[in-house]
Image (cartoon, rainbow, N blue to C red):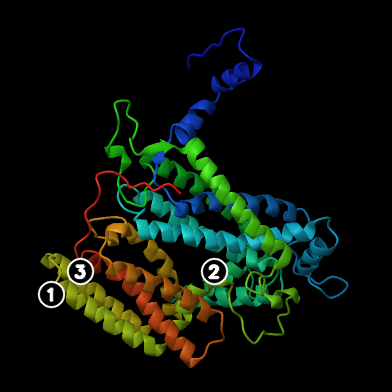
Amino acid sequence: MAEFKEVSPNAPAGEKLLNWVDNRFPLSKMYKEHLSEYYAPKNLNWWYIFGSLSLLVLVIQIVTGIFLVMHYKPDASLNAAGIPVAFASIEYIMRDVPWGWLIRYMHSTGASLFFAVVYLHMFRGLIYGSYRKPRELVWVFGCAIFLVLMAESFMGYLLPWGQMSYWGAAVIINLFSAVPIIGPDLSLLIRGDFVIGDATLNRFYALHVIALPLVLLGLVVAHIIALHEVGSNNPDGIEIKANKDENGIPRDGVPFHPYYTVHDILGVGLFLMVFSAIIFFAPTFAGYFVKYTNFIPADPMVTPPHIPPVWYFTPFYSMLIAVTDEMKYAMKFLVVLGAALAVFKAPMSKVGKAVVVVGATVLLVLLWSIDAKFWGVVTMGGAVIILFFLPWLDRSPVSSIRYRPSWMKILYTVFVINFLLMGAVGLQPVTPFSQSITQVGTLIYFGFFLLMPWWSRLGTPKPLPARVTFKPH
């Protein structure tokens, strides 16, 4: 049993209460470890506010979701007016529940802004090398959060039971039928029935409200614990723990509280101004945040002419539609080229080269025998999964883009523009021209990562400073 601390009988009541809590729960210890005595680099810039903003939006989504659940009914049957009960419950929230419209728009806007701040958070990690040793696990937990967030958003997209909800879910669920052998049974398992209906709605409701939020919260806690264990990265990519004073405090570090709590509070204030402006003046954001078609009740007998996903899925949706039978020829060529380079150029053992040859042969056979729809699903999923391997793909001797060769900034710029272009194209109806753009964009996206072990070692990096460079702002 731990020894209890004692305070003076004349101590203030607040100090006595805190001591009583500390003897039973490590409140002060946690405060010191994660705030007042957690030393962060003193040169963190505005790119570092998006982590705290992600946490803020997560809280907003949970709180507004709780209030929405109080009035929402996951029922796909038709009411007396011939409208699905689930859709009618959304209308009831919007029109009859006091402040229901505000809660609903906070939740829908929060979903889009969640992805916006997460994308910016991940981009900061990409340019400053926040995935490099010793932060590999921090990055892996972050990518897992992104993957679960995508699933959570997709499940929630079905719940309003409007036209775009229904048909968007139909398109995505039907993709699983392309999986060889188990595809039909897999899509049947996801739907819960032979058609999208009440069973599907209830499954997605349970996953969206209970299962996935629990997984998401667990991953967020793991992400923060892993970060505080190894310490925060900084724009210079220099480890501040390598230079400590006689008290063991990093010379280039400052306590997270109050310095960065104030920094983040200012960022939160600016974010809430944008958040409020969208809610009160453009809650649908011209159809990007809430599709206009989703204000029409779901009708299985009427298929919309165009079924685009929400904007934050469109880059990956573009990769899905990019894979055609013609694209498979390019994929076969790249498999052969990659295997040849690995065998003849890479420093590998004979066993390693044999494994590469066998693997490439198997992949070529699969590309030849399985249709393009399946490979589109693989490509879309692979675009997310490849992010997990980024810490081991980057072989540059320096972490931050500040000290890498200048031409790499152009490469990163091309990657970002390509990703944004893929997102814009994914919102439009599919045409031969747009499909050609998605095919080129898909090759650029995967080429950026798969060739990273090669291009990240090219050029001469700039010399790293002995200590972090700090410019007040």
SS at mark 3 in the image: helix
Mark 2 burial class by Cα count in 10 Å: few <14, some 14-19, many 20+: many
Cα–Cα gap, marks 3 and 1: 14 Å
* Residue that appears at 18% across and 72% down: 342
The disc labelled 3 sits on which kind of residue?
A: Val
Above or below for 284 versus 256: below
Mark 2 or mark 3: which is in front? Answer: 2
Above or below for 235 versus 192: above
The disc labelled 1 sits on which kind of residue?
A: Phe
The disc labelled 2 sits on which kind of residue?
A: Tyr
SS at mark 1 in the image: helix
Q: Which residue is mark 1?
A: 344
Q: Which residue is mark 3?
A: 355
Q: Hey, which quadrant is residue 362 in on the image?
A: bottom left
Q: Which residue is mark 2?
A: 312
Cα–Cα gap, marks 2 and 1: 40 Å
Mark 1 burial class by Cα count in 10 Å: few <14, some 14-19, many 20+: few
Q: Closer to the N terminus: mark 3 or mark 1? A: 1
Task: State the image coordinates of residue 53 (x, y, percent, origin top left).
Answer: 55, 52
Q: Nearer the viewer, residue 360 or 397?
A: 397
Above or below for 323 versus 97: below
* Residue that appears at 48% across and 92% down: 432
Q: Nearer the viewer, residue 325 or 305?
A: 305
